Amino acid sequence: MTKSKHQCPFVVATFAMTADGKVTTRELAPVDFTSREDKLHLFRQRALADAVLIGHTSLKRDNVRLGLPAELQEARIKRGRSRCPLRVIISNKGRIDDRLKIFQSDISPIIIFSTKRMPQKTQNALSKKAILHLSDSRHVDLAAMLETLRSEYKVCRLACEGGPTLFRALLERDLIDQLNLTIAPYMFGGAKAPTLTGLSKEFLPASVHCSLTDMRTVGDECFLTYRIKHQRPRS
Ligand SMILES: NC(=O)c1ccc[n+]([C@@H]2O[C@H](COP(=O)([O-])OP(=O)(O)OC[C@H]3O[C@@H](n4cnc5c(N)ncnc54)[C@H](OP(=O)(O)O)[C@@H]3O)[C@@H](O)[C@H]2O)c1
């Protein structure tokens, strides 16, 4: 599937990975193996976007608010933008706990893409705190979600903050445009610790080619920027 340049936002994924390719531990523990510089890098990428996207498992595990430090909020306002990007959550099953920290912060609207599998009680609770897009199908259609973000919310640049399951699903559909990858000076080992593309033993439908557009090192960390070469040219 190829997305039309006019219909979808530019999707930038940002991840930190160990030198042996792991993005988290077997227990899916919250990610804390990178420096302050890397955390600032993630915030800067978030600040550049109109919306930030996260998978339900990462949201649950890391219990993040997806906000920005005050100085980056001020810088956005000076550029004539909203204080913080829109916050977008994706879940097929929709069993999202409305007590998560993200729902206690009102720095920007929250949009949830899920399905009608979301229990009615959860729909009632979440509809007070977020805008719900619930589809009839069992799975969220990722391309349709991106089109909605572009057409209804004017999202031109979307920061995808994982996790690997969501990243892989977007990659398989050729919906990622840029990958920011921090290589952290650790190795975790373990077949059950997810890699950048998750735990699946399957190959991607086609190998994804990347073009390295930037590289810098700070201390023992390496910050890479790749442009993803699309499988078919955009219309
Ligand atoms: N190192 C890093 O930079 C980094 C970045 C982000 C996350 N992480 C780590 O990654 C781990 C979690 O990753 P994960 O791969 O297990 O989970 P994930 O990608 O964060 O979330 C997976 C869940 O999101 C929903 N989802 C994903 N793809 C979807 C799709 N195509 N359509 C609809 N819903 C979709 C589903 O929710 P439902 O189950 O509700 O249907 C799915 O179970 C955490 O440990 C986190 O700390 C690391």
Image: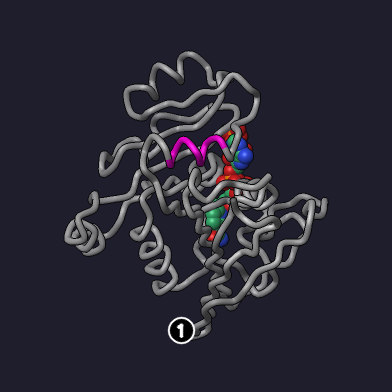
Residue 27 lies left or right of residue 222; in this view the side is: right
Residue 66 lies left or right of residue 226; in this view the side is: left
Q: Residue at x 49, y 83 (%)?
A: 216
Q: Is residue 29 visible?
A: no
Residue 15 lies left or right of residue 84; in this view the side is: right
Residue 146 part of the magenta-drawn span: yes
- Residue 8 on image: x %, y %: 50, 46
Q: Is mark 1 within 8 Å of ligand 1?
A: no
- Nearer the observer, 47 or 221: 47
Residue 98 part of the magenta-drawn span: no
- Residue 115 on image: x %, y %: 56, 24
Quarter holding the N terminus?
top right
Q: Is residue 172 visible?
A: yes
Q: Badge 1, how many Cα within 10 Å: few under 14, some, many 20+?
A: few
- Asked if 125 appears above or below 109 in the picture, the reply is above
- Residue 150 on image: x %, y %: 43, 42
When asked about the image quadrant of residue 108, the answer is: top left
In this picture, which residue range is highlighted in magenta?
Answer: 144-150
Q: Residue at x 36, y 43 (%)?
A: 154
- Residue 91 on image: x %, y %: 55, 34
- Asked if 115 appears above or below 168 in the picture, the reply is above
**Residue type at numbered disc 1:** Val
Query: How many marks on residues?
Result: 1
Mark 1 — residue?
218
When asked about the image quadrant of residue 149, the answer is: top left
Main secondary structure along the magenta-highlighted residues = helix
Q: Which type of secondary structure does the marked residue at label 1 adopt?
A: strand
| Type of colouring | one colour
- Asked if 140 appears above or below 51 in the picture, the reply is above
